């Protein structure tokens, strides 16, 4: 559901190739814009899903931390809580692994669909698109670090 829609993007590439073969510059441009619109939408959808999952996993981790704190305060219920924490950690680990797989698969799909676009249309969009994404990610990382530093200074 939140994965890159590879087949749909592949169909748009075929539309671009068809327009190029008919020397339809307007159609080629429209199909190319449609391709990048759909690709960007799929990436944003995946990123939103990823963010929601990270929030959910973080709240589960905090709940497990609270159970660990309960063990430290009350040794009599320790065994029951330890088992619940162990089970929770195993489930959390599994969910994190699945989320990592989701990210890897979506990243691979973006790379491959851009490679296919370049191969089929004789363009070099992949290089520029991925370079721009890396540049934005680095800039966002710097912004996040600055925000963290500001928050730390306020405390």
Image: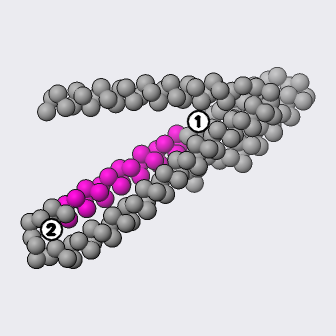
Helix or strand or loop: what does disc 2 sit on? helix
Given this view, does label 2 or label 1 mark the residue nearer the observer? 2
Q: Residue at x 47, y 53 (%)?
A: 99
Compared across the picture, whether 66 is left or right of 121 comes to left
Which contiguous range is marked in magenta? 44-67
Q: Would you identify the image quadrant in which residue 141 lies? A: top left
Q: Which residue is painted at 59% across and 36% down in the image?
A: 40
Q: Tell me which residue sits at (27%, 74%) in the image.
A: 83
Q: Is residue 149 left or right of residue 47?
A: left
Can residue 31 be seen? no
Q: Give the number of the disc on residue 71.
A: 2
Around disc 1, counting alpha carbons within 10 Å, would you say few (fewer than 14), some (14 to 19), or many (20 or more)?
Answer: some
Residue 11 in view of the camera:
yes
Residue of label 1: 40
* Majority secondary structure of magenta residues: helix
Dot placed on the residue nearer the N-terminal end, 2 or 1: 1
Q: Quadrant of the N terminus?
A: bottom right
Residue 111 at x, y = what percent? 64, 38
**Residue 57 colored in magenta in the image:** yes
The residue under the point 27% across, 31% down is: 148
Percent x, y of residue 39: 63, 38
């Amino acid at each position: 559901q939140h994965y890159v829609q590879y087949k749909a993007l592949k169909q748009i590439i075929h539309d671009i190739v068809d327009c190029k073969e008919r020397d339809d510059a307007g159609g080629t441009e429209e199909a190319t814009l449609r391709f990048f619109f759909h690709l960007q939408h799929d990436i944003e959808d995946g990123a939103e899903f990823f963010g929601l999952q990270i929030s959910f996993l973080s709240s589960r981790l905090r709940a497990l931390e609270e159970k660990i704190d309960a063990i430290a305060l009350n040794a009599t219920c320790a065994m029951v809580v330890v088992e619940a924490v162990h089970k929770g950690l195993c489930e959390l680990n599994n969910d994190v692994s699945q989320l990592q797989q989701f990210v890897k698969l979506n990243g691979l799909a973006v790379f491959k669909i851009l490679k296919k676009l370049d191969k089929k249309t004789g363009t070099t969009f992949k290089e520029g698109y991925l370079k721009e994404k890396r540049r934005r990610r680095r800039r966002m990382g710097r912004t996040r670090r600055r925000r963290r530093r500001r928050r730390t200074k306020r405390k």
